[in-house]
Image: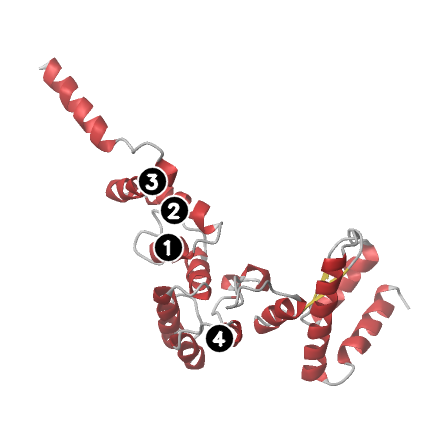
Amino acid sequence: MKARAALLAAVLAAGLAPPAHAQADPAYEAWLLRMGDYETLANVWRAETDNGDGAKQERLAELFLGPHARAAKARPFEGIHNLYWAALRGRRGAVLRLADALDKGALGFRQRPDAARCWANLPATFDARLACVRLTQFRDARARLGCGELPIAREDGRPLDGVDGARICLATGTPILLEPGPPPGPQTVRRIREYARHGITLSVTGDVYEEAFETYRNQFNRTTVAALDAAHGPGYAGRLGNEIDARAAGR
């Protein structure tokens, strides 16, 4: 009996043990699914989504927005974020599910039939996806992603310039101004707070000069200033900056 018990234990151990080279092996993922170990499966997929794998982002969205979200120990809004990321990378299933969620006001998205129609058209270009981002809204502000987290790429493969970067931020409703300088001191902190009161993020980018980044920063700021002036009247951004500088300096 002892021999039979030992043999049975060995067979069970072999059947339940994970395959070798687990992290890179699809068989390991299948084994985790069989075992119902959704937490480990989520961690394996997260490592790949961090590298921009749209297919894994779509699968994570399915896991985190499905019945096993609690077992996977998904962080709040992680399913929404991965669905959005996968859609922006052109994953057809994610795009259509996002469109459906926006049409119904489901999955943490605000009901926006116009946004739903935009995504349902399967936007394939930078400008088309940017138009859909502009229409996409959330019922809970904590579910929103910052513009730097949106993987919107040009269809021709060219790297994004400062104009493109600013347009992404403007589309998310988060205008940003980039300012060179050392870590913020008290006066700069006051300026950051004042800009935030007007819905603008002042981002201090450091005091190391790099010509390529200066070109990017100038393009970025010119685009943002032009958008602010178009929305609030000519010269708005300049006047606001002068007023904020004066208040921060105690003048």
Q: How is the model colour-coded?
A: secondary structure
**First reached walking from the N terminus: tag 2 or tag 4:** 2
* Amino acid at the residue labelled 1: Phe
Q: Which mark is residue 25?
A: 3
Q: Nearer the viewer, residue 132 or 146?
A: 132
Quarter of the image with the N terminus is top left
Tag 4 and tag 1, C-beta contact below 8 Å:
no
Outermost bottom residue: 233
**First reached walking from the N terminus: tag 2 or tag 3:** 3
- Distance Cα–Cα, label 3 vs label 1: 21 Å
The residue drawn where x is 59% and y is 60% is 148
**First reached walking from the N terminus: tag 4 or tag 1:** 1
Mark 4 surroundings: few (<14), some (14-19) or many (≥20) residues within 10 A: many
**First reached walking from the N terminus: tag 2 or tag 1:** 2
Quarter of the image with the C terminus is bottom right
**First reached walking from the N terminus: tag 3 or tag 1:** 3
Residue corresponding to mark 1: 64
Tag 2 and tag 1, C-beta contact below 8 Å:
yes
Residue corresponding to mark 2: 42
